[in-house]
């Protein structure tokens, strides 16, 4: 049965992937030169909160935090330049994106069996990236 499924779905999947990558123009990546810095901040925060919550291994918690930090960077890169100048970085957005990325990464890696603990690890990584990333806020200070 397994070979039948492979023979049936694999050629179609490969053809769809090949057509999708060559026919659809790629959008530039939204992550910037600070993605590794934010991933490292997230990894440290994820490892620390993993120790505090007693969830999984240190390496798994660091990977969850790193993915959350990279997702926070990507979410801030997607925002328009005008929105970044007007509002700066939003703590609610960073924590929410971090929590979502933490839950998703925790489900993939399977290190911690608790969804809310993965969310807490990701949210802490998002908050740490928000607090420790020294990116300037582009606010208009002429008031």
Image: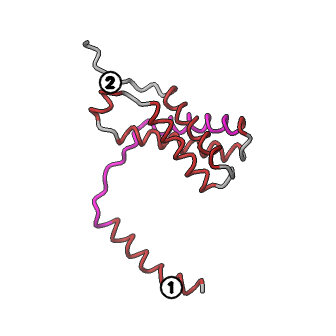
Residue at the extreme right of the image, as rendered: 54
Quick one: SS at disc 1?
A: helix
Q: Is residue 55 left or right of residue 18?
A: right
- Displayed quadrant of residue 46: top right
Instruction: Where is residue 106? Give x, y as percent.
Output: 61, 51
On whether residue 96 falls in the magenta region, the answer is no
Residue found 37% across the figure and 24% down from its top? 137
Instruction: Where is residue 43? Give x, y as percent.
Output: 60, 39
Residue found 70% across the figure and 42% down from its top? 58
- Displayed quadrant of residue 117: top right
Q: Is residue 50 left or right of residue 71?
A: right
Say which mark, if any, is on residue 7.
Answer: 1
Dot 2 alpha-carbon crowd within 10 angstroms: few under 14, some 14 to 19, many 20 or more: some
Gap between marks 2 and 1 measured at Cα: 54 Å
Quick one: SS at disc 2?
A: loop
Question: Do the numbered discs 2 and 1 sit on residues whose CB atoms are within 8 Å?
Answer: no
Instruction: Where is residue 89? Give x, y as percent.
Output: 40, 30
In this picture, which residue range is highlighted in magenta? 22-50
Where 69 sits versus 20, above or below?
Answer: above
Instruction: Where is residue 136? Give x, y as percent.
Output: 38, 24
Residue found 47% across the figure and 43% down from its top? 71
Q: Which residue is mark 2?
A: 138
């Amino acid at each position: 049965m397994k070979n039948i499924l492979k023979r049936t779905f694999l050629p179609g999947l490969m053809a769809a992937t090949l057509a999708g990558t060559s026919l659809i123009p790629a959008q530039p990546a939204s992550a910037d030169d600070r993605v590794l810095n934010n991933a490292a901040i997230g990894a440290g925060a994820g490892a620390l909160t993993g120790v505090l919550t007693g969830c999984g291994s240190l390496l798994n918690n660091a990977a969850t935090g790193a993915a959350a930090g990279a997702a926070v960077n990507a979410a801030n890169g997607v925002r328009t330049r005008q929105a970044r100048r007007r509002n700066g970085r939003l703590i609610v957005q960073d924590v929410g994106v971090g929590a979502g990325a933490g839950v998703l990464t925790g489900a993939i890696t399977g290190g911690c069996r608790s969804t809310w603990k993965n969310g807490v690890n990701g949210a802490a990584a998002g908050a740490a990236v928000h607090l420790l990333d020294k990116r300037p806020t582009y606010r208009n200070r002429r008031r």
